[in-house]
Amino acid sequence: MDLHLKIWFIVSLIPLVANLQHSVHATPEVPCLFIFGDSLADNGNNNYLATIAKANYQPYGIDFSDGPTGRFCNGRTMSDIIGQRLGFDHFIPPFATARGRDILMGVNYASGGGGIRDETGMQLVVFGHTYNQLFELHTHRVYHPLGARISMNQQLLHHQITISRIALLLGSRHAATNYLSKCIHLVGMGSNDYINNYLLPQYYPTSSLYTPDQYATILIRQYSQQLRTLHKVGGYKIVTMGLGLIGCTPAEIAIYGTNGSTCVDTINNDVQLFNVKLKSLVDDLNNDMTDAKFIYVNVTGITSGGTFTTGLTVTNVPCCIVSSSTGLCVPNGVPCSNRSTYAFYDAFHPTESVNEFVAARAYNAQTTFDAYPIDIHGLARL
């Protein structure tokens, strides 16, 4: 798999970045950073939800300064590192615990299991229901957005609560809007719409209702509405993170097999349909809303292109001992000791080393394919 999943980073830089808590910038490049997403960015919101999608226990956070916080990683997430590169000397607080003037630096709304579609991740809920009962709840459109996972639509509602609080702090809605116009809004959604929806036909009908191309089109159409809503409430600098190589995760390999390949190519091909449409959507949004700037980060391209260098040597198995039913780390299990050489910490989520590499290229693109039409550093300077 390491010939296909080419995630490169310079090993000699890892000791320098692994302990990076304070930014190299004197002041942040932007006044605030708002984060929307799923478990790749969740930093504690799911701790307070009735869900099995939690990471607030060891061995998660083994390399993080505060230990297990709810981050689905051994250390920092991509959004953590992007925030540091933008100059923030504290991590952006989760919506669940953000209070007072802390929200002026931004808020993280991300939720493990959350997706573009409201029903995505519903099987992760813990209400004493069986999976069959949960499917019945889904078919009757009875959702628990505050109980199991926080969808993109619900995260947008949470953002409006934050905006109201900022308006109170700054004295007026106009002052809040002016303040928000200078901030970066980082959005990474869609992975769960495949992992915890389209690829689970036993719980969701989407794969029988739509071809891969139709499903990608439907997702992008809804995502477009959500991003336009974000712009309407004050988002003028918006980063959209493309989806990664989902077919290369240990979980999907274990479920589907690779048929002689190094990854589940059919899954990667299906997900790439979404990425292609997302990049086109960025063009459409920039054309329609000339007062804003949207960019696309090519996560798949960053993790599958370039010149190979020594670094990641284990790319098809997780670093920690995982549960066969969830793919998450078993509580208090002992993870691998050479974590910087592993691509995945559990069966779904990348290690901090991978997060550092992707975040670095998203912030400061090394090729024209890393970020489009500009990188995050360029967006911050606008």
Image (spheres, helix red, strand yellow):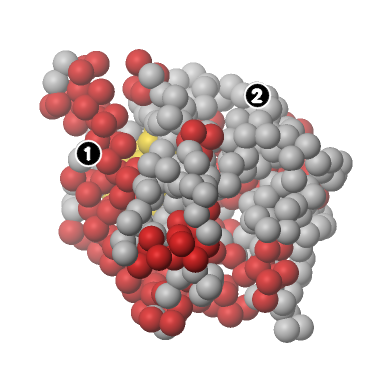
Q: Nearer the viewer, residue 25 or 178?
A: 178
Where is the N terminus found, in terms of image quarters?
bottom right
The amino acid at mark 2 is Asp
Q: Position of residue 69 (x, y in %)?
A: 60, 30
**Neighbour tally class for label 1: few under 14, some 14-19, many 20 plus, Cα within 10 Å:** many
Q: Position of residue 307 (x, y in %)?
A: 70, 62
**Neighbour tally class for label 2: few under 14, some 14-19, many 20 plus, Cα within 10 Å:** few
Ranked by sequence position, the earlier of labels 2 and 1 is 2
Q: Is residue 362 visible?
A: no
Label 2 to label 1, Cα distance in Å? 32 Å
Where is the C terminus found, in terms of image quarters?
top left
Q: Nearer the viewer, residue 200 or 366?
A: 200
Q: Quadrant of residue 78?
A: top right
Image point 65% across, 55% down: which residue?
326
In the displayed structure, would residue 52 be above or below residue 7? Answer: above
Furthest-right residue in this view: 337
Tag 2, which secondary structure? loop
Tag 1, which secondary structure? loop
In the displayed structure, would residue 169 be above or below residue 36? Answer: above
Task: Tell me how many marks there are.
Answer: 2
Q: Is residue 145 visible?
A: yes
**Horizontal side of residue 11 vs 193, given as left or right:** right
Q: What number is the disc on residue 234?
A: 1
Q: Position of residue 186 (x, y in %)?
A: 41, 44
Image point 56% across, 53% down: which residue?
366
Q: What number is the disc on residue 32?
A: none
Image point 31% across, 64% down: which residue?
140
Q: Nearer the viewer, residue 315 or 192?
A: 192
Image point 41% across, 24% down: which residue?
98
Q: Which residue is mark 2?
A: 66
